[in-house]
Amino acid sequence: MKKLSALVVRYSKLSLYGFLGLVLLSTIWGFQAFDGLKGGGYDDPGSQSASVTKVLQDTYGQSIAEVVIIADFAAGVDAPSSLKTARSLTKEIKAVAGVDGVSSYYSLGQPASLRSTDSKAAYFFVNLDDKIKQSVPAKILQDTFDKQYKTARVYVAGLAPITAELNGVISTDLTRAESFAVPLTVLLLVFVFGSLVAAGLPFLVAGASILGSFFVIWVLTLFTDTSVFSINLITGLGLGLGIDYALLMVNRFREERAAGHAVPQAVEKTIQTAGRTVFFSGLTVGVVLVAMAFFPQYFLRSFAWAGLSAVVLAIGGAVIALPALLNLLGDRINKGKVLRGNLAPKENGAWEKIARFVMKRPTAVLLVVLLGLGGLMSLASGVVFGQVDDRILPKDNRVVVASDVIRDRFDGREGSPIEVLVTEASAKQISEYTIALSKIKHVVRVQSTAGVAINGKLNTAAAPLFSNYAKGKFEKISAVGDLEPRSPEGFALTVEIRKLTNDFATIEVGGSAAIYTDSMLGISNNIPLALTWIVLSTLVLLFLFTGSVILPIKAVILNVLSLGATLGFLTWVFMDGNLHWLVGDFQTTGTIDASSMVLVAVMAFGLSMDYELFLLSRIKEQHDAGLSTIDSVSIGLQKSGRIITAAALVLAFSFFAFTTSGVSIMKMLGLGIAFAILLDATVVRALLVPALMRLFGEANWWAPRWMKKLYARFGIGH
């Protein structure tokens, strides 16, 4: 850091304008990323269900209907007026650009399974051209047909309309949230930084991080599927790190100026101390975010690389561009003061008093806080993880209304069948399996080359209708269930079907429920690997920073406690349906979205380590100077407590603005990260850390002799 600090001070204009120039140049390509981003990304592309989907497309020429339309006829589906309306509706749907084909209750032989239980509504299945962006024709179909059409009330549902509605709602919600959050964030920053000029510095770091990351996202879209939600992560994380790092750097610069150092020397000292902390903090956050790359879903993998790029660029902005600007501005960063007195941090104050209060009675404080956190964690005892469906949108949204019609008025889920593919199968094997499959609870009907089976009774007369189910080496067996496929019940049904005894050469189970099941397994099976990566990498990095074995272990344990409390809180809110008055209306489905919870956990863990390093760096600095553990913790908390709490408050407010969204997972992300940040910056850092460090005393800094040698050679001293 000494060489870097000298270069930045000597070539301040080049450092500032060169860094910003490269970032701005990258936006020429970066803003092109938006057209290549995709919704969805929750499925496991390497799973059994994905293999089935590929065979159905390549061998059977079959694709899942991206749009499911329900026509509700007052006169009944078989009335002459209804038949006339259905023909006209089919013709007009086919005429929409991007529609590849239409099948319906009428074109498929008017089976009872494709009409509602009251015989007044019927299914229409619409396949879209996979060479175009499917949300475009989906929105046209919604805008054109989701209303009264001649003698029918038409509803438009399906994956493509859900994605179209989701993108539209999120775009509108983010604009509204930003128009509400940004002015108030600026106001908070003015008071946190103490002056108008200093309050603008976080936007220098955040802007570099956000705009530069768009370029990285653009590159990603050229090689792999990238989630549209990665933009939300970049903006949230970029702003958050911009606030954290700018506050840390400015605070240290003011401290060095108050100690009598000239501006250039103060900037150099700032880079060598606070800049080192920023670098190591960012490195830790980035390593934690990489854990999302272990999951197969591109929804999560996108966050790993988007987050890593935001962190790297935030570090660059904080240790190159920002110090260069500090050197150019000097004491003018204090222009437009809004707070009285000296803005430099003091060694005595409220945080020092809190620390000494806690360290006088560490056991009592520890027990009370652990009881509180344990109470919050207990709220998660009944948590059930699931995945999103249309119900993440407001209940009065048109695609939700359409999906509710399917849920309420149709027995079977015809638009989302269970698809089984087998090879080298005899007619007897197909017949026996078809019958056995139809006996499973929640399976309404099974059809194969053997015929149609319902409740264990096989109708072989229908067999000719399904002769095309045999293609080359494959035989397809299709089943319809009567439950929500993307649900814990759909998961259980898929598992039961996969356990069904058979003697086929190969068998694979696909369809909507299986896709959901494999996606959940893709998360649960990879969580141990992601956790191992996070824990081991964090322990190693914190050891290299502190030279202690105890402090890294303590940090990980405290973060786990904080995350457990956050999970309990989110379960109470979003699974049990509480706090509508605070976060607005949302639908409860009896589950918590697993992918979103992974994101909340990783983000919260990373930002918690950010604050942990801010605090430890100041404590270690005092301890290395010869102070006792009690004095080191007291002064360290005094010098970092305001930074941590102020940064956490502004960042939590920025994320909390997401709760104004009509999309429930955005509400959960916003509330979850805001709660975790505030809990960590107050209860954990101000109470648990001083209490535990007091109990451990000088043992806080213990490490075996051989590890001390490693630290002496490879460690990053303050």
Image: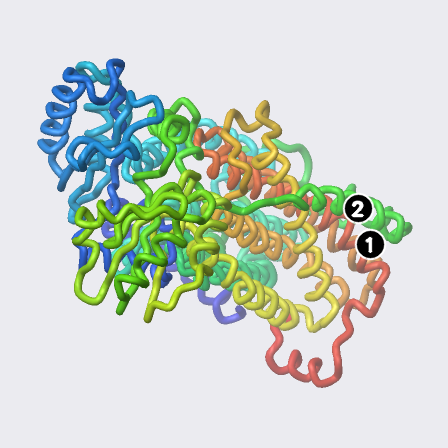
Helix, strand or loop at mark 1:
helix
Residue at figure coordinates x 11%, y 27% from the top left: 92
Where does the image place residue 679, in percent across and percent down from the top left?
Answer: 67, 43
Towards the viewer: 134 or 154: 154
Q: Earlier in the sequence, mark 1 or mark 2?
A: 2
Towards the viewer: 49 or 538: 49
The kind of residue tagged 2 is: Val
The kind of residue tagged 1 is: Ala
Residue corresponding to mark 1: 691
Identify the disc placed on residue 369: 2
The scheme the figure's colours follow is rainbow
Towards the viewer: 647 or 495: 495
- Give the answer, above or below, for where 85 lies relative to 653: above
Residue at figure coordinates x 19%, y 41% from the top left: 127
Where does the image place residue 8, in percent across and percent down from the top left?
Answer: 45, 62
Mark yes or no: residue 324 visible.
no
Towards the viewer: 718 or 647: 647
Viewport quadrant of the C terminus: bottom right
The reply, left or right, for residue 285 in relation to residue 158 is right
Q: Are marks 1 and 2 in contact (CB under 8 Å)?
A: yes
